[in-house]
Amino acid sequence: MSMDNGFENRGTPEDLRGVEAAVDAIAQGERDAAPVRLEQGVFLASYGSLRGEATEPVVVARIGRGMGMRVRLAAAVGLVGAAAAAWLGYSAMFNRVGAPVQVANGLEDDVNYVLDLRSSTDDLAILGDRIDSLLLDAGSVGDSLKSDATTNLLGDGAL
Amino acid sequence: MVPLAEAKRPQAGNEDAVAGLLAAAAGGDESAWREVIARYARRVFALAKSRCQRSDLAEEVTQSVFATVATKLGSGGYTERGRFESWLFRVAMNRIRDEMRRMKRQAEPADPATFGGVKAPEVKGETVEGVELDRLRVAMRQLPEVDREIVELRHHGQLSFKEMSELLDEPLGTLLARHHRALKKLKQLIEEGAES
């Protein structure tokens, strides 16, 4: 007999055997109380892995968990809704009085500034058009001056 | 005299048979894998159920454990050297501990005042060798973690002390002493429960 078997067979002290037998009874009860589908579920969840295939755990009805998840989801939605409502209320309250009006005014100023900028850009475009027309006019004047000078020269020669 | 617990323990013994089953299963033999599951699934389930106290969770843990074992076997990541049970239950214990940690994270702390006026229910249920099983269940939950682990591996998982020694990496004598000490604590807790 090996030393290991010696240990296995050494046994439990007399005064603890009743407790040990009772623990064994509970453990046996747990094994017997396993769902009848246990082995099949384990097989379905594991056989693919044996062949290197990805497998998912067989769905086990976990009502408590499912309900818990739904309750948590509902709570999260409620929390977001409450936060949104609080924020809207907060905004509405401060739009009526106090500093946030300044914030709103500041925003309005910014919008006006952008509009002014855009209009000034428009003005620049107009200015550009005007410069172009001035250049055209200047060109015309130049051309007319040239033609006058030529006429004068011809006139002088003719005379 | 062979101890009661030992007499009831499955003499899976035939390590050669287990090795043969594992080799066949690793090669994709469906019936061999079913046989492995038939031998061990309920023992893993009982261990998980005792710890989690929930049948659905224990079933899921059992599936997960065997999926892990199958993956290792199928990929050649496990070499059988007569220590399959130790390995299987190590995988199981790790998985159970993960699940317990997850459960603790999700548990909402209860106000101790809530339980101030609550008394332990009067239990007059089934008895074995003069021990009321309901009282024993309560006592099991009161055991320190390390003691409870030893008791559950030995009785729910039906491991031998040799296998437990391999699993927990502790000397046989230490485990034997720890097992006796755990049973003694259980007995004390039952007696204290009965007196109160």
Image (cartoon, coloured by chain):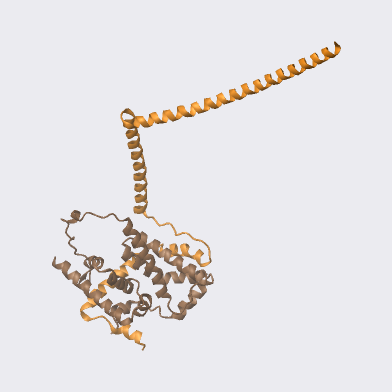
Chain colours: A orange, B brown
Q: Which residue sits at x=26%, y=80%?
A: A12
Dividing the picture into quarters, in which one does residue B148 lie? bottom left
Give the left or right position of residue B195, taking residue B181 as reference: left
| x, y percent for residue B60 | 40, 61
| x, y percent for residue A57 | 44, 59
Dividing the picture into quarters, in which one does residue A26 lie? bottom left
Give the left or right position of residue A24, taking residue B166 as reference: left
Instruction: In the displayed orientation, state which residue is furthest to the left.
Output: B195
Instruction: In the displayed orientation, state which residue is furthest to the right.
Output: A158
A102 relative to B158, above or below: above
Instruction: In the displayed orientation, state which residue is furthest to the top.
Output: A159
Q: Nearer the viewer, residue B130 or B56?
A: B56
| x, y percent for residue A147 | 77, 16
What is the count of numbered marks?
A: 0
A121 relative to A76, above or below: above
Instruction: In the displayed orientation, state which residue is furthest to the bottom.
Output: A1
Q: Nearer the viewer, residue A107 or A40?
A: A107
Q: Nearer the viewer, residue B168 or A94?
A: A94
Question: Where's the C terminus of chain B, which quadrant?
Answer: bottom left
A119 relative to A60, above or below: above
Residue A110 in view in this figure: yes
Q: Which residue sits at x=37%, y=55%?
A: A62
Question: Where's the N terminus of chain B, which quadrant?
Answer: bottom left
Residue A35 in view in this figure: no
| x, y percent for residue B92 | 39, 68
Q: Nearer the viewer, residue B191 or B175?
A: B175
